[in-house]
Image (cartoon, rainbow, N blue to C red):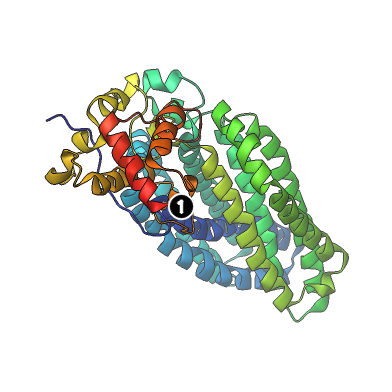
Amino acid sequence: MEYIGLYPLFYFPQIGSAWLMGITGAIHIMASHTSVGAALLFAFLAHKAYKEDRPELYDYMRKYGMFLLIFSYVVGSITGPGIWNTATVASPRGISALIHNFVWVWATEWVFFIVEVIGVFVLVYTIGKIDRKTHLKITYMFALASVSTLFLIIGIISFMMWPGSDVWYQTGSASDAFFGINTFPHMFIRIGFMIVMSAVAGFVIASNLKEMPLRMELTRKLSVIGLIGGFLILMSFLWYVQTLPQSALDLFHTVLWPLNGTSRIITVSIIAAYLLLAFALPRLITLPFATVMLVVVLVLGIWPGEKMRESMRKPYVAGRYVYSNQIIGRDVIGKNIKSEMAIIAEKGLLTVSPFIPERLRTITPENQLEAGKLIAKLACSNCHALEKGAAYRPLPDRFPGQDAATIEIVLNEVIATGVRSYIPPIKLPEHETKALAAWLATQN
């Protein structure tokens, strides 16, 4: 029997496997983005404190640093491994593609991360205990390590969108995968948002200061820093969209922006208005107000944006050769990887997948519905929930009131032909298509 290298299936009811990974990732990004932005802010504040002899700025850095240790490095340290766990079960071939391409890049990133973690502890706990020049050097080291971890990770996750050209498919080189045309605009978008996050989190710390003149000064400075970060986001985003593959651009313009564009504009306007208010009327930025706005910016700023970015790379999960359902969709000569589309079209998913109960490898009238549900899990559950009316992209709701014959036509003439560019164009044998259509018809 000829099998393809699919892993055992993981499915999380009502949400779907990929959404579980996305939720974990969004929480991690909230923590990590605040960390890198704060590292750059600390470098600025430490430089200012050293050059201008401003000891009160060190006190502010100490308070901000304690917040950072708890929020970014405790929450981040928990959710970071959480991403690895959920990614491994939800998208094992996707994470495998990244590891096999970037194992040494990831190893280097971990070295910088260790320096970053040690650096933030040393930075916070040595304030006032070592000479200021040495402390400034430690702050610079912390900022450099933080930005280096960002750069290395961005090169990896930008590959998830696409390598940038066909060169990598021929060479399989890590450098060709890492330095895609999407890497640097993606990095500067992240840096811009991290700067905004450092300002918004900084408002919370500043609003708790007792010295009103210092509180107002820092609030105004942070608002300017946040607006600079926002401008960087805008410019980098205009650059970023020019580096997307055509399918991602099509999905962005025809589906994602019409659905989410208005909400994104409102969110950006709220954040910009908040930063302008902080500059014009810093007294209004009280601790409760600043705390609420931090949560608002974290939730409204990160989750919808990450959801849109993740959706744009569909139907792929990595490198535009691994589909979101883990099937290899094209040859990669440089990695000796072969497309699995032809063998699936010929023999069927239930035949070539290794972890299938023997009683379902051959479809009969008695097991057709059970086999159809299993095919739906294999082919669709990485993006869709299988329960009608579920929270995230319920698959049965895509076929409202349709009978099996109509659904079969859609599967053959729309899905399998790639008319919907964001759906893997998997062609199944007739008996598996009928089983999937029959099960879907019973669900709607």
Q: Residue drawn 22% across and 38% down?
A: 350
**In the displayed image of the protein, which residue is found farthest to the bottom?**
210
Horizontal and vertical percent position of residue 59: 66, 73
Residue situated in front as seen by the camera: 26 or 364: 364
Residue 93 visible to the viewer: yes
Please tell me whether residue 245 is drawn above or below residue 150 in the rendered image: above
From the viewer's perspective, is 210 left or right of 99?
right
Q: Residue drawn 56% across and 72% down?
A: 66
Residue situated in front as seen by the camera: 429 or 25: 429
| Label 1 secondary element | loop
User: Quarter of the image holding residue 283?
Assistant: bottom right
**In the displayed image of the protein, which residue is found farthest to the right?**
280
Residue situated in front as seen by the camera: 432 or 328: 432
Horizontal and vertical percent position of residue 77: 43, 62
From the viewer's perspective, is 208 left or right of 421?
right
User: Quarter of the image holding residue 169?
Assistant: top left
Please tell me whether residue 369 is drawn above or below residue 416 in the rendered image: below
Location of mark 1 (residue): 394
From the viewer's perspective, is 427 left or right of 269?
left
Q: Residue drawn 33% across and 43% down?
A: 438
Horizontal and vertical percent position of residue 251: 58, 35
Q: Residue drawn 22% across and 33% down?
A: 4
